Image (cartoon, rainbow, N blue to C red):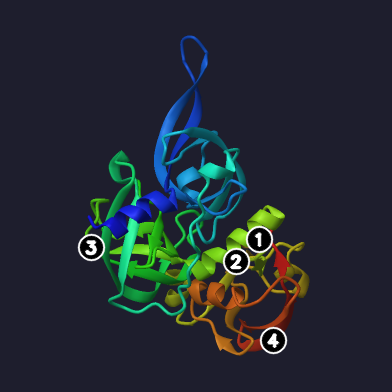
Amino acid sequence: MSLLQCSYLKKTHHLSFTSLISQRDAFTLDVMEVPQGSGSGFVWDTDGHIVTNYHVIRGASDLRVTLGDQSVYDADVVGYDEDKDVAVLRINAPKQLLRPLQIGSSGDLLVGQKVYAIGNPFGLDHTLTTGVISGLRREISSAATGRPIQDVIQTDAAINPGNSGGPLLDSSGSLIGINTAIYSPSGASSGVGFSIPVDTVNGIVEQIIKYGKVTRPVLGISFAPEQSVEQLGVSGVLVLDAPPGGPAGKAGLKPTTRDSYGRLVLGDIITSVNGQKVTNGSDLYKILDRYKVGDTITVEVLRGEQKVNVPVTLESRD
């Protein structure tokens, strides 16, 4: 390992996480903290904010962060974004121990560019692997909600269980992504790993630190699986439910129901939003990600045999 790579490990102050769940002993009825899993993360600022993947901390009753000097701190959850699989924690550690990463940019990355992944694969803390960017603008699904995450970085740097939430760095040591997933039937690295780009992460973390949550617009519907719509011979998103209190319900989008004889009455089928074609749920999510809460969009739906344009004002998720 070169001196330059060694300095990355020292300066980034990479972290490891232990998530705990509370369980009650069946015989003594005592409550015990049982380790649920481990993951990686990194220091965001000197105020003690720590960034990792949401799926690393999901379901944990307690979280502990181990810094590079092996000091351990209890962590509180500041907020998270399930859709993009990002979480922000906070620890009460001395500022001199907190060395934030330099934030880079993911907008000008190139295939073939050298990258470094730091994490705790299989519990082996402070492990650095190298590789190149092997693909750009990939799409993966959030481990928590299944909502698509766009513009993901694909790398051949070895990413294994325990790497989740760790940083992906460029050759200058700047953060360009969060290691979040591997593509492997066995769960071990097979040369294809994915990182959420820092340009996506940056805005999410800023919102969470400022407001404690991410405000993302929603249409307020549940929709049918893509295969179900294909069987109908149409292209679009079939509205299964549109609660009356949600934006789609207020605008008058029709949900799928049953008549008095129990026969299925199909709801509206969304075919485009503001003139942009919608063929499946992924298309719909991508389009909604371009708008903000309070925007009014025009949703074109197939209602029976007619095409109807419905204006819908987007709202935030409760």
Instruction: Tell me the amino acid under the disc marked 1.
Output: Gln
- Can residue 263 be seen in this snapshot? no
Compared to residue 125, the image places residue 44 above or below, namely: below
Query: Sequence order check: which comes first, mark 3 or mark 1?
Result: 3
Query: Sequence order check: which comes first, mark 4 or mark 1?
Result: 1
Q: Which residue in the protein does label 4 denote? A: 309
Instruction: Tell me the amino acid under the disc marked 3.
Output: Gly
Q: Gap between marks 4 and 1, in whole Å?
A: 33 Å
Q: Which residue in the protein does label 1 denote? A: 207
Instruction: Tell me the amino acid under the disc marked 4.
Output: Asn
Residue at 45% from the left image edge and 81% from the top image edge: 233
Q: Gap between marks 2 and 4, in whole Å?
A: 32 Å
Between disc 2 and disc 4, the foreground one is 2
The percent coordinates of residue 266 (x first, y second) are 59, 72
Compared to residue 174, the image places residue 23 above or below, namely: above
- Can residue 201 be seen in this snapshot? yes
Between disc 2 and disc 3, the foreground one is 2
Query: Sequence order check: which comes first, mark 2 or mark 4?
Result: 2
Q: Quadrant of residue 153?
A: bottom left
Compared to residue 116, the image places residue 313 above or below, namely: below
Between 137 and 11, the residue placed more toward the observer is 11
Q: Gap between marks 2 and 3, in whole Å?
A: 29 Å
Alpha-carbon neighbours of circle 2 within 10 Å: few (<14), some, or many (≥20)?
few
Q: Please tell me whether mark 2 sits on a helix, a strand or a loop.
A: helix
Q: Which residue in the protein does label 3 denote? A: 191
Instruction: Tell me the amino acid under the disc marked 2.
Output: Gly
Between 253 and 183, the residue placed more toward the observer is 183
Q: Are marks 3 and 1 in contact (CB under 8 Å)?
A: no
Q: Which residue in the protein does label 2 denote? A: 203
Q: Please tell me whether mark 4 sits on a helix, a strand or a loop.
A: strand
Q: Are marks 2 and 1 in contact (CB under 8 Å)?
A: yes
